[in-house]
Amino acid sequence: MARKLGTERTRRALLRSGALALAGGIAGCTESSTNAGNPQSTSTETTPQSTSTDSSGRSFPYLHSASGTTAYGIALDDKPVFGQDDALVDMYYWSELNCKYCSEFVKRIFPQILENEVANGTLRVVALELPYKTENSWPAAILTTCVWKQVADTDPNKYWEWYQTMYEKQKEPGSGWADQENLLNITENVGIDPSPVKSCIDSQGDQIKQKIEEEIPSQSKIPGTPGFILFNRDSEKSSKVVGTQPYETYAAKIKEVQGN
């Protein structure tokens, strides 16, 4: 079934209608760096990765590039997209490399979503940047985009290895771990040539920053990271989840938006 594309007016109408529902038990990074919800595990154990393929023949984590703008107003160009393009439900996922709860999500929860709702064709995930925590947040977000541009057409699943490695190497915000030089070193160690990434940063950094700024949700929509909008591409029903929640919370919200 062809999915319809929309305009910014569609997205604003959804927001005005109060279609967003906030999930309880928030545990995420906010500008005040407070945890407003349930305590999260401090385990650094990473969920084992699946070797399965989806119905499109893509292997875990089902990464690919896409284009166009969704009915919610999210531009897909230069964004990592997980899952089938004809999935009924979109998940727009905002993160920040310096957010410890994003690290928890990537290590423990995201793989479960990929192995279930994404693999079975229900969900498509679009990864977005929300840089705000430290002076290195913007450079890190631009670098993240440039890494994706480097591998999107040739080896998109390499991005997942890079992405997980970044969160495994994550240290306290402001510690210097997210300095560009260190992130480029990690990038090289993962097996991605850092030279084109650095060239992208130098030549396209301002343009990338402008695009990210245009898509940063207002504080009333996504107050911290990780933050998620679930959007039914047929009915245009939507729901919001903020913070790293148990996998069951995401699964239930996806079913709710799906209409089950």
Image (cartoon, rainbow, N blue to C red):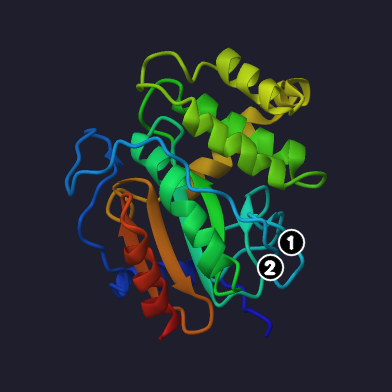
Amino acid type at image mark 1: Arg
Q: Residues within 10 Å of mark 1 (few under 14, many from 20)?
A: some
Extreme right residue here?
Answer: 154
Inspect the image, locate mark 2, and give the three-letter code of the amino acid beneath it.
Answer: Asp
Residue placed most toward the observer, 83 or 144: 83
Q: Secondary structure at mark 2?
A: loop
Quarter of the picture containing the N terminus is bottom right
Label 2 packing within 10 angstroms: few (<14), some (14-19), many (20+): some
Looking at the image, residue 228 sits to the left or right of residue 153; the answer is: left
**Residue 241 visible at all:** yes
Q: Where, by quadrant of the figure, is residue 11 drawn?
A: bottom left
Q: Quadrant of residue 200?
A: top right
In the rendering, which numbered label is found on residue 203? Answer: none
* Disc 1/disc 2 C-alpha distance (Å): 6 Å
Residue 18: x and y in percent read 28, 72
User: Would you say the residues marked 1 and 2 are in contact, meaning their CB atoms lie under 8 Å apart?
Assistant: yes
Q: Give the quarter of the figure containing the C terminus.
A: bottom left
Taking the image as shown, residue 233 lies to the left or right of residue 174, namely: right
| SS type, badge 1 | loop
Q: Position of residue 80 (x, y in %)?
A: 63, 50
Between 215 and 171, the one lying in front of the other is 171
Name the residue tied to disc 1. 58
Image mark for residue 54: 2
Name the spot of residue 146 as percent of width and height, x first: 67, 34
Residue 171 sits above or below residue 12 on the image: above
Residue at figure coordinates x 68%, y 21% from the top left:
189
Q: Residue at x 56, y 32 (%)?
A: 165
Quarter location, residue 24: bottom left
**Image position of 226 (left or right of 223):** right
- In percent of width and height, residue 88 lies at 55, 78
